[in-house]
Image (tube, rainbow, N blue to C red):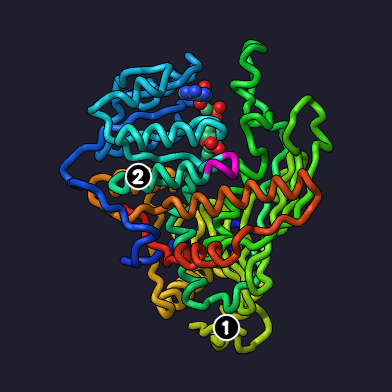
Amino acid sequence: MENEQDVTRRDFLKTAAVAAAVSALPGVGAPAILANPSPNNVVNYGMIGTGTEGCTLLKFLATIPEGRCIATCDIYPPNLKKGVETIGSNPQTYDDYRRLLERKDLDAVMVVTPLNLHTQMVVDALSAGKHVFVEKTMYFKEEEEGQIRRAAQEHPQQALQVGLQRRSSVLYQVAMEMIRKGALGKVMFVRANWHRNSDWRRPVPDPKYERLINWRMYKEYSGGLLAELCSHQLDVANWAFGAEPISVVATGGIDYWKDGREVCDNAQTIYEYTGGRKFLWSGVLYNEHFQFQEEIMGDLGTLVITLGKGMFYRERVAKVSKAGLKENWWAGATVANAATQEGIPIFPERSARTETGFVDREILYAKRWLASLGIYKYEEAHDPWWSEMSNFLATIREGKPIIAPLEIGVADAQGVIYGNRAIETGQKVFWPKKQESEVRSQKTEEKPQASGV
Ligand SMILES: NC(=O)c1ccc[n+]([C@@H]2O[C@H](COP(=O)([O-])OP(=O)(O)OC[C@H]3O[C@@H](n4cnc5c(N)ncnc54)[C@H](O)[C@@H]3O)[C@@H](O)[C@H]2O)c1
């Protein structure tokens, strides 16, 4: 029989099945005003780009009966075939997305192509009367913001959702609810990293496909590490702060993988927000020890989030937060000490094992504490990718608020573009028209909501 001492932190994380989430929280972002939303209608959709991410989404979509894939499009035949096999609904295939958009029986499309193609495809799809899901980063160049914005404004009855799937994750929603309820005190700093030890290249069967398959390596198509990886975590920082940055300093380079690539193999950025709040991001392709995580720091505590689990660490110092909240209330003093050093699992991985002793108690205290904040325990029933697709279909069918709407995508894309500009110029880059930016950030300062499941 296992006793308390046998339960190591690693076991604890593996075995503990605390899963917390918000219930019935207000909606996120701009409301979707759809012409004839109907929960009875199955959404006919088409997938444009059936590469790695397109097939990931199709894999989850195959289990969602509220939608039916009737068309797929890709210009690379092996990927087109892979997409058809993944969804298994016998969709009609296209090598020109404009032909796909001509179909009158198509309600929605997902744009999951290289970054440089997003804007034209989104604008064309909205103009063709389709609801649109577009992968992050929403757009490539600064001037494209206006094109997407105009198209969205001209088609207000159609949903436009950006593929930042953490917005659909119950774990991240709980984290944001903890912040909003003051559990972390005054949040001043977010630190995140995405570290890999790989060249980030994909195998190419024929050199003529190099640029098509390894588009990420070339500036003509790609915003590099910031567009592909930082974008997810910058969005988490924007969400945590309830704001957009006001400036960024950054550095990076092609310092390790000198293989003809045009984008950095490492990048370090510091985004600044009003009130001196900062987001420090690091991406490298030559060491994977720290992999990826976000650390959200307030004057009462720290949240460390990785995909699938979250830990809360209470600050040792007993004090009143600068935000005015008194020191955290804890259900048990013993646990409070443990939580200072070892943390409380807010959302660990699920496991078949039964919790015992110490683990049980810690979970119970975490539950009580979350309940005291008005946050309830919940399990992430689905992968966030599943939830974001489900949310997209629910917006179309039921008029549910768009989980990651235009403004969130714009704030994210702008941060990526300015971060890259700071690396390229070596200069600090400031957001233009701060007043407007502030107004927009207030709009995006929403409460997290439970995913539509
Ligand atoms: N949300 C996430 O976690 C996540 C993860 C990976 C990728 N992404 C995003 O998804 C997008 C695609 O990334 P990926 O890794 O799947 O790339 P990929 O290269 O694996 O897939 C892109 C596909 O688009 C196809 N394509 C290229 N030009 C086309 C055109 N004109 N018409 C139709 N198809 C065309 C390619 O042949 C390829 O099959 C990017 O924006 C990327 O940032 C998001």
Residue 27 found in image quarter: bottom left
The residues tagged by marks 2 and 1 sit, at their Cα atoms, a distance apart of 41 Å
Residue numbers of the magenta segment: 140-144
Looking at the image, which is closer to me, 228 or 353? 228
Determine which residue is flagged by label 1. 323
Give the mark, 2 or 1, whose residue is nearer the N terminus. 2
Give the side of residue 33 with respect to residue 123, left or right: left
Q: Residue at x 62, y 30 (%)?
A: 221
Q: Residue at x 23, y 28 (%)?
A: 105
Whole-percent x, y for residue 381 in the image: 37, 52
Q: Residue at x 30, y 20 (%)?
A: 90
Badge 1 marks a residue whose secondary structure is loop
Whole-percent x, y for residue 72 in the image: 37, 23
Numbered tag placed on residue 309 in the rendering:
none
Looking at the image, which is closer to me, 431 or 250? 431
Whole-percent x, y for residue 51 in the image: 50, 26
Q: Is residue 182 above or below residue 421?
A: below
Determine which residue is flagged by label 2. 154
- Is residue 339 in view? no
Q: Are marks 2 and 1 in contact (CB under 8 Å)?
A: no
